[in-house]
Image (cartoon, coloured by chain):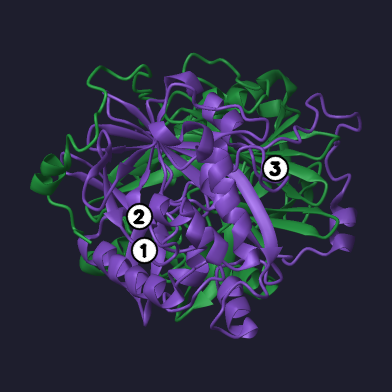
Chain colours: A purple, B green
Amino acid sequence: MTFPITRRAALAGAGALAVAPALAKAPLSGQQAAGVYRYKIGDIEVTAIHDGFWQRPVEGLVKNADLFEVQDAMAAAGLPTEKISITFTSLVVNDGKSLTLIDAGNGDAGAPTAGAFMKNFRAAGFDPKDVDAVVISHFHPDHINGIRLKDGTAQFPNAEIRVPEAEWAFWMDDAKMAAAPDGMKPVFQNARRVFGPIAKDVKMFSDGKEAASGVIAAATPGHTPGHSSFVVQSGAGKLMVMSDLTNHPALFVRNPDWQAVFDMDGEKAKAVRRKMLEMAASEKAQVAFYHAPFPATGQIAKDGEGYRLAPAQWSSAL
Amino acid sequence: MTFPITRRAALAGAGALAVAPALAKAPLSGQQAAGVYRYKIGDIEVTAIHDGFWQRPVEGLVKNADLFEVQDAMAAAGLPTEKISITFTSLVVNDGKSLTLIDAGNGDAGAPTAGAFMKNFRAAGFDPKDVDAVVISHFHPDHINGIRLKDGTAQFPNAEIRVPEAEWAFWMDDAKMAAAPDGMKPVFQNARRVFGPIAKDVKMFSDGKEAASGVIAAATPGHTPGHSSFVVQSGAGKLMVMSDLTNHPALFVRNPDWQAVFDMDGEKAKAVRRKMLEMAASEKAQVAFYHAPFPATGQIAKDGEGYRLAPAQWSSAL
């Protein structure tokens, strides 16, 4: 064996076969394939729809860990250590009775590398007019902006918008907005931009109640005051939709005590995260996370003091 | 929190919101998305094309480990412990000068759950007439049958077929076929079916030589006598195409001393596997395996006595 092959060896090897010198008949594509992946939960068809990513420095992401520890965790996952790509993956739940979207993506108000939701949604064969319900986990902009574009257009014109009662109570409260630090006020204002025009029609759900056909809400506060997870259940199948219970699993599933800067109540978020991850590990349930690498689903296993996400094996069979 | 949600709680929760009782406007899809994923290696565009899977019992897969150990490794990866889905992922390499396919898939001669290559290849925007070269890692049927369908059709009519010299010398040798155990004779016969009609045009490559434009061969015998890996290199980018150096990475990257029943010379395969995995880990090079879960690429890291594959994070950006 002559591994590793040096550049010189590669050049020396060139010409050993007659290689076509002309340009390839197939041009470079320059395009990624559609970010679409389907799986069944019992009789329910779940489709993961990718909305792209947002790249930010690793530094400053974790409130209560040293940068070098965080970078070690990134490297251990084969990821870059300076910048992290935080991805966005919504779920379409089709139980044959109703078409439900869980979290709406960034719409046209996210990073330039995000906003791929609608292209991928259509590539999956869906029409936004066919969505019966949009279920929201919490009111951070990357989850709700897809409901309404910057010009005011409602992207899912026939869908009922359903939100956690406690989340609505917090973000739509003008007294809370007035009392909030300036840096957080835009999140309050953005919620008004998105929900204001349809405020009287928005439906609320609470802990343990059906948020949409086949989708049960589970209050998991901490990340935001009314943050909700969901259970999709059919026959023997069960999916725990963990929403933003963790940000990137290579960091926060591996180290559940770490607190992301996005967690509003870090201590509460940590406690709820540990409880939910322990439940997922002991049940061997399938899980989905909004910010896990696409297709953002797998199983949780205990690993040392923390957990790890074993990504589901991609299958060509449904 | 009312987690875990029981079936009774879910039913009790139903009706809390007015759920549309009619059938969803969107029917169930019943179809997986195309098994296509692209990544860049320097200026070269690599497209992973999925050919489906073959399901077989876990029992009997590893020659030199107890079944319960193998099942533990499957469970640790979140995989089923009775049956394993062995997947097939070919690579299309486009360096702007030439379009090269590395390994041709099962064609129409594999398991009913395989044979998706051509559908996915076309979904990726490729035309089989545009393939300049088909480069083969070794002569096992799941790598070469895509060259020629059962009715004799050549699937890549304009492509030059390029194979490892040592592989050709072994499998096309009638004396070796005569001396082979009966169970192995069909593999010899299949190589004649695939290559016979074009035998005088098949091109050979050897260790360290260019197998196609941008693709350098590296002899890695053991799995078969002439088994070849490849290096795709451009600028600062480098991809180690590991072919069948391991079967499922959850078993054989984690436990490189385990020998799959498919390894013809188990001891030699083990030594070469350890050497290559160590090299990949120390170089932090990107790797691809034919039998890793789609999209079948990532990084190798040391882990205890073995290694693990950290799958590449799916990216919507090329």
Amino acid tagged 3: Val
Residue at label 1? Answer: A221
Mark 1 belongs to which subunit? A
Up the image or down, A317 lies above or below A207; here it is above
Amino acid tagged 2: Ala
Please name whichever residue, B227 or A11, is drawn nearer the observer in this view of the structure.
Answer: A11
Instruction: Give the structural element (helix, strand or loop) at label 2.
Output: helix
Where does the N terminus of chain A fall, quadrant-wise?
bottom right
Which image quadrant for residue A306?
A: bottom left
Instruction: Evaluate whether residue B168 shows in this view.
Output: yes
Mark 3 belongs to which subunit? B
Up the image or down, B24 lies above or below B273; here it is above
Q: CA distance from mark 1 to mark 2?
A: 9 Å
Residue at label 2? Answer: A166
Q: Are marks 1 and 2 in contact (CB under 8 Å)?
A: yes
Residue drawn 64% across the image and 39% down it: A115
Q: Position of residue B115 (x, y in %)?
A: 45, 28
Please name whichever residue, A46 or B158, is drawn nearer the observer in this view of the structure.
Answer: A46
Residue at label 3? Answer: B46
Residue drawn 22% across the image and 64% down it: B67
Q: CA distance from mark 3 to mark 2?
A: 47 Å
Badge nearest the viewer, 1 or 2: 2
Mark 3: few/some/many CA within 10 Å (<14, 14-19, 20+): many
Judged left or right of residue A228, residue A34 is right
Q: Position of residue B187 (x, y in %)?
A: 44, 38
Q: Position of residue A13 (x, y in %)?
A: 85, 52
Residue drawn 45% across the image and 23% down it: B108
